[in-house]
Amino acid sequence: MKFSSVFILFFMLEMSVAQAQRNCGTAGYIQQLITTDPFIKNSFNKAAAQITAVSNNSAARDIVADEIINLPVVIHILYNTSIQNISLAQVQSQLTVLNNDYSNLNADRINTPTVFATLVADTRIRFCLAQVDPQGRRTTGIIRKYTKTDFFSPEDAMKYAAQGGDDAWDCKRYLNIWVCNMGGRTLGYSSIPGGPAATDGVVISYDVFGTTGNVRSPYDKGRTATHETGHWLGLKHIWGDAICGTDDVDDTPVQQYYNYGCPTFPHVTNCSPNGNGDMYMNFMDFTNDDCMNLFTKGQKIRMRALFAENNIRNSFLLSFACDSTLAQGGALPAIDTTVAVQPFAGLKIYPNPLQSIVTIEYIGELKASVLKTINIFNVTGNKVYSGTVISAKTNINTAGLAKGVYILSIQEGATRITKKLIKE
């Protein structure tokens, strides 16, 4: 899907800001979808209306009130470097976090303030790595693909094989999670109910996914995936993405804005309903991983409403992809199968950091494929160079560029390669 220059500008500006606090890309992503395709808002509103109708109807809620809902998950790991090709242990650690957080079995639930303790819920939603693929064959639920893309932005390229990503599995039967290198400060983002099937799912940066391996503090407890999956299940940010806004959940207190870091209880603002202040430990706030520890009963109702009859995620109640005994074919190896794509080793870009000239050189078999459109953008999204590579070795004059970070984009058809350039 093509996104406007406004969104690209916003993303590029993010790249130049130090990583000071959590940043979820969902709200901006959804707003950009609506801007790009105004008709999609009707689909979002219809899904939201379904959630509200079931949430407000006790008889409808009872239909899926106690049933354990099992969600088969497929993890699309997209790596440009070996460190991004995260281990099986890191993947499994994230599944453990999801199951603990959504079951109220997380060890840090003891940190929930007493005044909120009676509101905490076991959502009775569980997650498994898919054991059956869309064709009925055995699978580990993990796909690994090399990508030529250095980093991704919240514009869905990681969800399409033709754009350096991997195509989604059937979103009516699987929760798709793409793990990749996210640029800027964005830790992850999610689709929301009612969006396009091809882009339905959650995206998480590889270094905030799980609790072991290549993870960075203070986002090393797997809570980014817990938060973004909450959006996928129909939850809003707890402050409603507005000053003193609403998340449409009755038992989450109104709060002025998001919280970050780890506040001290109570954190009272101008719109706090009482002295208990903000529920900043809710998974749908922006606090650090080790400060988040709960979903509420009201949030549980809204999430489970998606699975009611005729509602958007009802089809998951019929999914059998968590049960390996129903798959065709023989047993899989004990470790996850790697599906690798050869690196785009036939392209050299040097020197970097830049000097007065940057050279783009095609080598090997790529010497015959040199007709590529090339653009260079600065961090504000402004194009500072545009041209065409017309030979196997092309020099571009960069002497006039100011010091800073630039994005080099080379594209032909649906294939695009992006590289970060630095001018010192």
Image (cartoon, grey):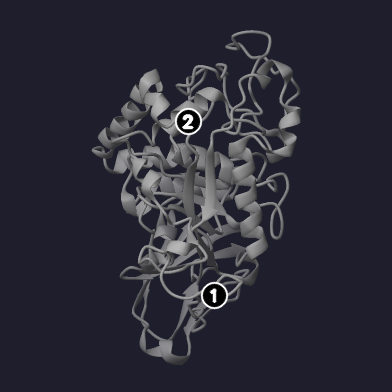
Residue at the location (39% across, 35% down)?
306
Residue at the location (37% across, 41% down)?
313
Disc 2, SS: loop
Q: Residues within 10 Å of mark 1 (few under 14, many from 20)?
A: some
Q: Which residue is mark 1?
A: 357
Q: Amino acid at mark 1?
A: Ile
Q: Which residue is mark 2?
A: 236
In contact (CB < 8 Å): disc 2 and disc 1: no
Which of the image's four quarters has the C terminus?
bottom right
Residue 389 coordinates in the image, percent (x, y): 38, 78
Nearer to us of marks 2 and 1 is 2
Residue 303 coordinates in the image, percent (x, y): 46, 33
Q: Residues within 10 Å of mark 2 (few under 14, many from 20)?
A: many
- Most distant residue in the top direction: 274
Q: Kindly report the distance in space between the C-alpha atoms of the residues bearing marks 2 and 1.
A: 48 Å
Q: Earlier in the sequence, mark 2 or mark 1?
A: 2
Q: Amino acid at mark 2?
A: Lys
Residue at the location (41% across, 45% down)?
7
Say above or below: 217 vs 303: below
